Amino acid sequence: MTDNGATPLLEFRGINTHYGAVHILKDVDLAIYPGELVCLLGGNASGKSTTLKTLLGMVTPTTGEVVLDGEVVNDKPTSYRVERGVTMVPENRRLFKRLTVKENLELGAYLRNDRDGIEADLERIYDMFPRVKERLGQKSGTLSGGEQQMVAMGRALMARPRVLLMDEPSMGLAPALVQTNFELIQQIHQAGVAIFMVEQNANMALSIADRGWVLQTGRVVLDDTADALLANPDLRASYLGEA
Amino acid sequence: MRVRHAPRTRVDWFLTFLRFSLTALVTVGLLAFIGQQIDPDNFFARAVNDDASRLSWESIKDLVVSGLSQGAMYGLIALGYSMVYGVLGFINFAHGEVFMVGAMTGMITSNKLADGGLWESNFVLAILIAIIVSVLCSTMTAVLMERVAYRPLRGSPRLIPLITSIGVSFFIQYTSALLLGPGAKSYPQLPDWLRDDIPWLGIEGKKIVVLVVAAVSMAGLWYLVERTKTGKAMRAVAEDKEIASLMGIDVDRTIVTTFAVGGAMAGVAGILWGILFGSVTEFTGFLPGIKAFSAAVVGGIGNLGGAMAGGLTLGSSESLAPQMVLEPLGVTGHTQLKDAVAFLVLIFVLLVKPTGLFGERLSSEDRA
């Protein structure tokens, strides 16, 4: 659903990254438009995490430009990008386990100062995840995996993101929860937040995404609509486990 | 979940032996003490110590109050060790020196105020000024230390900042000697109402002041850490720096805040030292620093309530144990064994509960 002419919200232009001498991302171009749900597929060590870290400014590209809302943000810190609407739900949730659920949610809104807005957003998250509301005072480390996932999403939403980066949302969750999780992602998407999802579970990801890329050893090898990718024989062979 | 035990080695047997013998010694000592309190001539007390005699309740009360006031001071210093360990995972051995700087600048300020006459005319105002100056100087020392000595080492193996901190410690000690001259320097004399016993309590006024100031500082710190946005950021950084920065928290600034708050607590402790003991040398930071570090470990390092509890435990043990355990056991020169007792408590707690009184098992993720 790339509407040509619109400005991408977040963009990679010819990105190359290195860890020491190791070349990770190779000439990667990506563009995420407002309100889309896109996914980046790839196996282990294909450069998926590096892509996310580069988008957030935790890794600086050696060449190329990271563009946020038409502005080159290569040398801007993570906090600058978070303030402008980029937030991530990290792999394995990574909640602050010794902090309460409420504190975790409040930390999501760390850069915001609009008290009323924060309160309103908290209420919205309680509506979305009633189970979270029951556990507000509890240390988040004591929650079940599914509940932690809700808190992690809630925490990210508290930053009022325009694009939500999701790192392996199906990782480490029971199959039933993976399903719920993807429903939550769709729900957030329908609320108008663009979603950039990095996944190994290609079937699940493509079933809800508009478009997708396939990353292989740091290079984008496929770039197409989700339906086309699902039908692509190469992809079926290598990622969907079909001979 | 069943925990599988590794086969016991000789070291394990040795540790078990230590645990039992220490426990036995403390138990026998305490029983003998109870014996002598009931009747110094009773068979058991005499058998353990020929010279058993009863300790007056008055002196027991004095020991408890001294122990608690000194323990509160250790606790305040211990907070700094614990907080820095919490966010950076290394022991800042120069923290004792931050405390010394507080005691030194408190000494300078209060002497100036005594010269000006304010110390005598309005002691409360004078001591408040001295506290503020000490706290500011200690805070600045701690912040500068982080900026100059530790930040450039961020990301290097943990042993390196640890060794650096020992160097920083020497640097501050000898800088102080260079600037102010070596040797002991006295605080001006405290007003009578602080040196005398408070009538209906029978406790020296200065000890009450120490306990009150320590309690107020602790409450302030608790509020900061548990109830403010800054405190939330500190706890988040202590747990997971990467995710904290993902929330938009400035990790470097939060680390500086941690050093500053720890430094402020050490500054308060410095002034309290001056009030309790009346003099300070450039080496004043060493022993209380090491003991406060032990207190932090006894309470469970990284845990703020634990640091305070550890301080009180250590302070009261080193004050009480010589009279209540060592003397009934017939140990000679027991009053000089105060420092040894403090470290024995450390060893004992680590033998019985290696994570400290309130310690949780630390996650391996951040501090392998």
Image: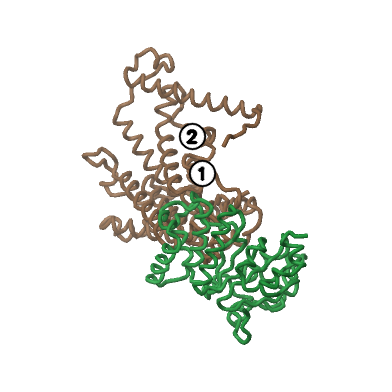
Chain colours: A green, B brown
Query: Residue B114 in the image: x percent, y percent?
Result: 33, 57
- Mark number for residue B345? 2
- Contact (Cβ within 8 Å) of mark 2 with mark 1: no
Q: What residue is drawn where x is 40% and y is 14%?
A: B44
Amino acid type for the residue under numbered disc 1: Glu
Q: Amino acid at mark 2?
A: Val
10 Å neighbourhood of mark 2: few (<14), some, or many (≥20)? many
Q: Earlier in the sequence, mark 2 or mark 1?
A: 2
Q: Are marks 2 and 1 on the same chain?
A: yes
Q: Residue furthest bottom?
A: A5
Secondary element at image label 2: helix
Indicate which disc residue B360 carries. Answer: 1
Residue B269 horizontal/vertical position (percent): 41, 50
Work out whether residue B177 can be spotted. no
Q: Nearer the viewer, residue A228 or B285?
A: A228
Q: Is residue A63 shown above or below B268?
A: below
Give residue B204's position: percent from left, percent from top: 29, 41
- Where disc 1 sits, the SS reads loop
Whether B187 is drawn above or below A198: the answer is: above
Residue A77: percent from left, percent from top = 58, 72
